[in-house]
């Protein structure tokens, strides 16, 4: 059932959603957007309706032509003989009883569109509470007439009246049987839609108006001319309206473009069809091969977008796509994406293809062939570099995407050249070379995907093993952390990508944090050595011996070994000094050899419980049944196959044109958030000896919006607060950073309540910042920096320290620090002569903050680097000294 | 865990080009091998095919068609041309003849026969069975040419619907039959058939016999009732209304139902047989050949059956007919713009009666029997309907040979 939906309805739903979103983003009005959707969908379907009309005409003609013969045979012959006579008669009339089904096509074609429109418009969050014209709430039935306490929905009745009128025009001169059919359907729609949201009824009413106009036009001899004239006039008036109103130049350009497209439509259609006739001439003699080219081309497109691209994406990090809310096995996700893609590229195109006559089919085949070439060129040659991608397919630097254009527009040039080559090929050889060539591409796509899928399956089976064993060894442990009341606790909370400059704002926004998180000192003048975990975290966990420069200095050992080592320095140091050590969700580190170190993975284990405990089971349900991920994957495929200049639009700020785009990313946020919220409940406060704990959290890494002012997670956000930033990504990061501190505030309260606050040294720090933290207020750090190549916020992590017994509100300290100071801060005074257990060097030994070398390289994955060293170019080192706030202190080592 | 959050959507381009290369190679090698294999296979299979097929096949639906095929078989035997005779009659007279070039085989009746014929291999297949590819008898892919031989000198449009549509050729008794067939071809938009006038094999055969037994008439005045079949035929339509007064005359009455009646209208026939069982002057005839019974009749009553022409042309004797009730709807004639020629011919050479004449049927018959005035008209009509007299066997054989690799 699901597969059937994905192949047949899903593409239509997506089409309607995209059209709605596109129009809505332009018009900013729900009602007008519905009108726009209706008009667009109907215009797009017009050729299909024309075909349906032709079928119906043919069927009527055939029936009329054959009536005498059929009546005669039915009157004279009986039983088998009648059947045999009829089938011979049909054969001689080039008719098949199944053709009668074709005439119901006009009705049939409306079904997927109806289901899709129903699905989109009943779930559209925009409809609720929005009024339009005479409709007070598009999200509920209109209830316009109130008689004696009963409310009557008027719009469905209006809709039915128009429907009946349209049917009456259409069936003029038809048999009674046909007339009755249409009226019954009109009545059916009335019943079906009577209690639907008025937005949906409004949409269907518009469709009926369109159908009425269309039917009147079809009965006229100059249908095409009238339609052209009226459409041009309507759009012309609309464009005039756009210009008279206070509109942006982008909107005006779009309006003009639309108008010229419509006004020149006949010319465009004529010239395109002339060009296609010329190219199609060679194909005309081999209709079967033309069909072959079309089908195989579409299969190739389906494979490329539904298997090749998603399988390489999944294969690049199988773990991220395993055991997600919807799919345990990433292959299920892959299969689901593939079926959606089949709907888009095989099912619907084929349906449309076979509706049309030979000439149009030739054109389709040419376009399909061009599509394969263009899609492949964009997907494989012009991949583009847009930074890294999160599992919910957000690029962490979407700005790069906006600016992204292939050098010299090479992508467009390549596409044009490919098109010329293909057209030349078709002109010279027809289907002779094209068919085997496209078959070859399709087979290659299939083989490639199979290889990828095999790799995914293999990796998943090993993931499953660890997953199951994790499950077995207390999958959701009830006691993880321990604190002592008698001795000393050292707690280090690492917030991945928490933004240093935000700390002051967050405490200003909610001064109560000064009370709950009392005694903290905020080191605002702190830098990190890298902009990503892979280069920022080692120094944070291991100290100055693990800066990118130092790690590359030990070129004989593998990078992974050094990363693991950096994360083991502190746990080993404390454990070997007799402390109880617990670490959770560490990015690297192999703790198996150290029995005294307790290591856990808690991320992703408590979010479902959290949702249920907080009365949000519905949201959980939505997540589990969401098609968001396969849809996103599919759109990611569209993203990859499109030219660079379109990718920003398709990316759609990571929403990929979905109505409800953020359910998935919000759920991912919860995976981390629920684990952070759980800390107090997972703690014992009766440890006998000293206790050392490192907690890593990704709460600050998952950008999403939360409910202002508490930054709480709620199913439907109604208040976002005010935006102080230049981009909404930054605004979202501010939200999650705030949420993290609110959660930590609650944790501190809990520690206080248990009497373990004063004897606990707490460090909150992050491994790195974020590239583009830009305030609207240009006087704020780092928005006043002139040289855009320097992105100081990339290297601006959080560093906050509360020492034993410290009290008072947040204190800002502007000492020049780096987050590599953390190991020293943590061990000072509690461990005498703290040395790195691996190197034997004192933790503070090699501190050199005069001219630290920071790496600007932003490849975030291990595989992007050399086996033993980070791959950092000479022009990717930057230095800073004394104050990160002064632009003149930042210097590229090698001029860019 | 944060490191795993970084996914680069890189696509394995290198692996991809490797696979393209591999697949290309495999594709071309496989295609070459396939072409080579195909050439080999096709070369040898053609040879086996030509050995196995039977070039001339004649199919007889029943023993009653023996006279239709016999002249053809005799001619082929004379020319020493090999042919296969397949029959659905176990007691086919073929088996009591000794042909050296013609091999005969009983292939069963109905579906048993059709299932064999539907997979027949032949250069040409000759038959009298209409409705090819309409009823259960389908066109066999192995037969290059289907040829229909008319077993009646009436119009070729009097078969049930689509009777001749899927034959490649029709062998006619007279040129007048061409127009009707061509009209149907045009109207039905079907391929034009090869039409050759060959005369009538069975009339040739019967006239040879009729010459020997030209007068089988005895002293009793004998009336032959020889109808067609179907709802408009006189037995179905009038039955006892006609037969009662006829039997009352005391004349010898021979009723010879159409062979298809025994199949399609058995109940109606049985009822009539019971009704006249006690009458000594009533005789039911179902002999294979009609020539004996025709020769015994002083006068014939019929409707629109082809037997009228047999009687008129072979014995030049008078007949009465009633065919006002003729319903063209089940027949190919339904699609023709004109009424079949034979109806006007009947009026010219016979005496039409209506049901109101039944009470005086005895008197009418005796006066018609004595009337010699239509003899010249009968001869004229015969020249139209039955051409190339005496040559049919030879002409059919010529046609078969022209289509076969012998």
Image: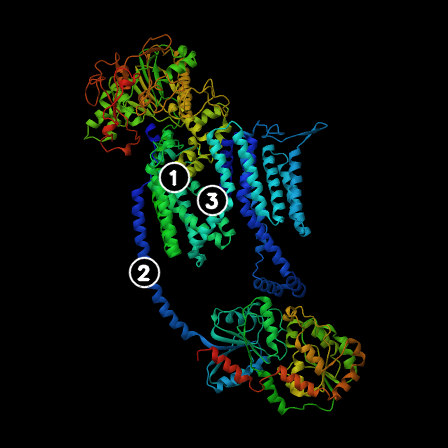
Residue matched to label 3: A343
- State the residue in front, A595 or A828: A828
- State the residue in front, B146 or A272: A272
**Whether residue B46 is situated above or below residue A104 in the rendered picture:** below
Q: CA distance from mark 2 to mark 3?
A: 36 Å
Q: CA distance from mark 2 to mark 1?
A: 41 Å
**In this view, the mark in front (1 or 3):** 1
Residue B53 visible, this angle: yes
Residue A578 lies, in percent from the top left, at 26, 17
**Whether residue A270 is situated above or below residue A312 in the rendered picture:** below
Near mark 2 (Cα within 10 A), the count class, few <14, some 14-19 or many ≥20, is few
Residue matched to label 2: B33
Residue B293 lies, in percent from the top left, at 67, 85
**Do the residues at discs 1 and 3 belong to one chain?**
yes
Near mark 1 (Cα within 10 A), the count class, few <14, some 14-19 or many ≥20, is many
Q: Residue at 19% of width from left, 20% of height from top?
A: A840
């Amino acid at each position: 059932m699901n597969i059937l939906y994905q192949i047949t309805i899903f593409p239509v739903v997506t089409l309607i959603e995209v059209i709605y979103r596109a129009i809505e983003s332009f018009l900013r009005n729900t009602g007008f957007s519905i009108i726009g959707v209706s008009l667009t969908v109907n215009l797009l379907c017009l050729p299909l309706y024309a075909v349906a009309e032709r079928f119906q005409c043919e069927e009527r003609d055939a029936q009329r032509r054959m009536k005498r013969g059929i009546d005669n045979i039915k009157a004279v012959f009986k039983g088998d003989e009648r059947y045999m006579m009829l089938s011979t008669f049909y054969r001689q009339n080039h008719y098949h009883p199944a053709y009668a089904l074709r005439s119901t096509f006009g009705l049939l074609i409306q079904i997927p569109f109806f289901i899709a429109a129903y699905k989109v418009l009943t779930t559209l969050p925009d409809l609720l509470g929005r009024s339009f014209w005479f409709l007070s709430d598009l999200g509920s039935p209109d209830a316009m007439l109130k008689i004696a306490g009963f409310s009557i929905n008027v719009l469905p009745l209006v809709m039915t009246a128009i429907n009946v009128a349209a049917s009456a025009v259409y069936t003029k001169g038809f048999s009674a049987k046909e007339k009755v059919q249409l009226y019954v359907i009109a009545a059916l729609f009335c019943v079906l839609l009577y209690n639907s949201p008025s937005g949906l009824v409004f949409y269907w009413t518009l469709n009926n108006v369109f159908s009425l106009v269309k039917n009147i036009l079809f009965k006229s001899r100059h249908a095409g001319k009238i339609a052209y004239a009226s459409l041009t006039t309507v759009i012309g008036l609309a464009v005039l309206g756009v210009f008279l109103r206070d509109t942006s130049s982008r909107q005006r350009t779009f309006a003009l473009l639309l108008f010229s497209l419509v006004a020149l439509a006949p010319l465009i259609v004529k010239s395109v069809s002339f060009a296609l006739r010329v190219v199609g001439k060679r194909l005309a003699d081999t209709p079967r091969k033309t069909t072959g080219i079309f089908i195989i081309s579409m299969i190739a497109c389906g494979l490329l977008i539904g298997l090749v691209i998603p399988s390489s994406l999944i294969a690049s990090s199988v773990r991220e796509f395993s055991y997600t809310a919807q799919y345990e096995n990433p292959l299920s996700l892959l299969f689901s994406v593939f079926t959606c893609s089949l709907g888009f590229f095989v099912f619907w195109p084929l349906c449309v293809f076979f509706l049309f006559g030979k000439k149009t089919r030739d054109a389709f085949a040419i376009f399909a062939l061009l599509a394969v070439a263009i899609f492949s060129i964009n997907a494989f040659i012009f991949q583009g570099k847009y930074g890294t991608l999160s599992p919910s397919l957000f690029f962490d630097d979407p700005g790069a995407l906006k600016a992204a254009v292939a050098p010299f527009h090479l992508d467009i040039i390549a596409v044009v050249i490919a098109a010329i080559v293909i057209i030349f090929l078709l002109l010279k050889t027809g289907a002779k070379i094209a068919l085997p060539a496209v078959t070859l591409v399709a087979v290659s796509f299939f083989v490639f995907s199979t290889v990828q899928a095999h790799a995914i399956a293999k990796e998943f089976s090993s993931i499953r093993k660890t997953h199951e064993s994790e499950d077995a060894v207390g999958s959701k442990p009830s006691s993880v952390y321990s604190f002592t009341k008698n001795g000393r606790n050292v707690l280090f909370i690492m917030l991945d990508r928490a933004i240093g400059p935000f700390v002051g704002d967050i405490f200003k926004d909610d001064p109560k944090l000064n009370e709950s998180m009392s005694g903290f000192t905020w080191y605002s003048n702190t830098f990190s050595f890298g902009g990503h975990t892979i280069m920022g975290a080692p120094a944070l966990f291991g100290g100055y011996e693990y800066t990118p420069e130092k790690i590359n200095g030990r070129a004989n050992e593998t990078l992974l070994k050094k990363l693991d080592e950096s994360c083991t320095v502190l746990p080993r140091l404390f454990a070997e000094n007799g402390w109880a050590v617990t670490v959770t969700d560490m990015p690297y580190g192999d703790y198996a050899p150290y029995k005294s170190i307790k290591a856990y993975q808690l991320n992703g284990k408590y979010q479902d419980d959290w949702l249920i405990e907080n009365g949000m089971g519905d949201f959980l349900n939505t997540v589990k049944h969401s098609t968001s991920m396969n849809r996103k994957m599919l759109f990611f495929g569209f993203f990859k196959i499109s030219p660079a200049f379109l990718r920003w639009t398709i990316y759609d700020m990571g929403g990929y044109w979905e109505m409800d785009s953020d359910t998935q990313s919000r759920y991912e946020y919860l995976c981390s958030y629920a684990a952070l919220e759980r800390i107090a409940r997972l703690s014992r406060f009766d440890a006998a000896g000293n206790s050392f704990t490192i907690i890593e959290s990704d709460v600050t890494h998952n950008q999403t919006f939360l409910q202002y002012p508490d930054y709480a997670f709620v199913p439907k956000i109604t208040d976002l607060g005010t935006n102080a930033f230049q981009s909404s990504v930054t605004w979202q990061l501010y939200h999650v950073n705030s949420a993290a501190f609110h959660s930590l505030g609650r944790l501190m309260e809990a520690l206080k309540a248990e009497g373990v606050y004063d004897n606990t040294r707490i460090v909150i720090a992050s491994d790195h910042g974020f590239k583009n933290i830009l305030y609207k207020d240009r006087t704020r750090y780092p928005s006043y920096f002139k040289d855009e190549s320097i992105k100081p916020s990339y290297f601006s992590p959080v560093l906050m320290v509360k020492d034993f017994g410290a009290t008072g509100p947040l204190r800002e300290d502007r000492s020049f620090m780096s987050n590599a100071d953390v190991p020293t801060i943590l061990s000072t005074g509690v461990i005498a002569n703290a040395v790195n257990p691996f190197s034997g060097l004192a933790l503070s030994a090699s501190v050199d903050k005069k001219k630290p070398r920071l790496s600007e390289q932003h490849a975030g994955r291990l595989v992007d680097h050399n086996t033993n060293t980070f791959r950092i170019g000479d022009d990717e080192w930057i230095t800073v000294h004394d104050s990160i706030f002064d632009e003149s202190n930042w210097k590229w080592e090698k001029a860019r | 865990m944060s490191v795993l959050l970084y996914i680069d959507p890189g696509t394995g381009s290198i692996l991809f080009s490797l696979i393209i290369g591999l697949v290309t190679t495999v594709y071309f090698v496989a295609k070459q091998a396939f072409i080579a294999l195909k050439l080999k296979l096709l070369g040898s299979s053609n040879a086996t095919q030509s050995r196995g097929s039977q070039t001339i096949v004649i199919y007889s639906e029943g023993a009653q068609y023996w006279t239709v095929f016999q002249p053809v078989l005799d001619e082929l035997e004379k020319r020493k041309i090999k042919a296969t005779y397949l029959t659905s009659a176990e007691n086919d007279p073929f088996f009591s003849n000794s042909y050296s070039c013609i091999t005969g085989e009983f292939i069963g009746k109905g579906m048993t026969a059709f299932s064999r014929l539907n997979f027949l291999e032949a250069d040409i297949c000759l038959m009298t069975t209409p409705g090819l590819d309409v009823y259960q008898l389908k066109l066999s892919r192995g037969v290059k040419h289907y040829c229909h031989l008319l077993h009646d000198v009436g119009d070729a449009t009097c078969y049930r619907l689509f009777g001749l549509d899927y034959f490649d050729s029709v062998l006619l008794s007279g040129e007048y039959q061409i127009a009707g067939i061509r009209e149907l071809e045009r109207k039905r938009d079907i391929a034009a058939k090869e039409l050759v006038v060959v005369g009538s094999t069975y009339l040739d055969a019967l006239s040879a016999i009729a010459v020997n037994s030209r007068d089988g008439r005895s002293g009793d005045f004998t009336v032959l009732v020889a109808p067609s079949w179907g709802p408009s035929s006189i037995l179905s339509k009038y039955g006892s209304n006609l037969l009662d007064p006829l039997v009352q005359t005391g004349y010898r009455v021979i009723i010879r139902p159409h062979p298809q009646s025994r199949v399609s209208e058995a109940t109606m026939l049985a009822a009539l047989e019971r009704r006249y069982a006690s009458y000594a002057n009533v005789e039911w005839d179902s002999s294979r050949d009609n020539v004996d019974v025709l020769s015994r009749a002083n006068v014939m009553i019929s409707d629109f059956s082809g037997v009228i022409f047999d009687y008129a042309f072979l014995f030049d004797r008078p007949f009465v007919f009633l065919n006002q009730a003729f319903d063209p709807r089940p027949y190919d004639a339904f699609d023709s713009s004109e009424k079949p020629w034979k109806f006007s011919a009947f009026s010219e050479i016979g005496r039409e009666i209506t049901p109101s004449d039944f009470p005086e049927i005895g008197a009418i018959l005796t006066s018609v029997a004595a009337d010699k005035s239509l003899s010249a008209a009968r001869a004229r009509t015969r020249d139209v309907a039955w051409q190339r007299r005496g040559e049919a066997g030879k002409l059919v054989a010529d046609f078969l040979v022209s289509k076969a690799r012998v």
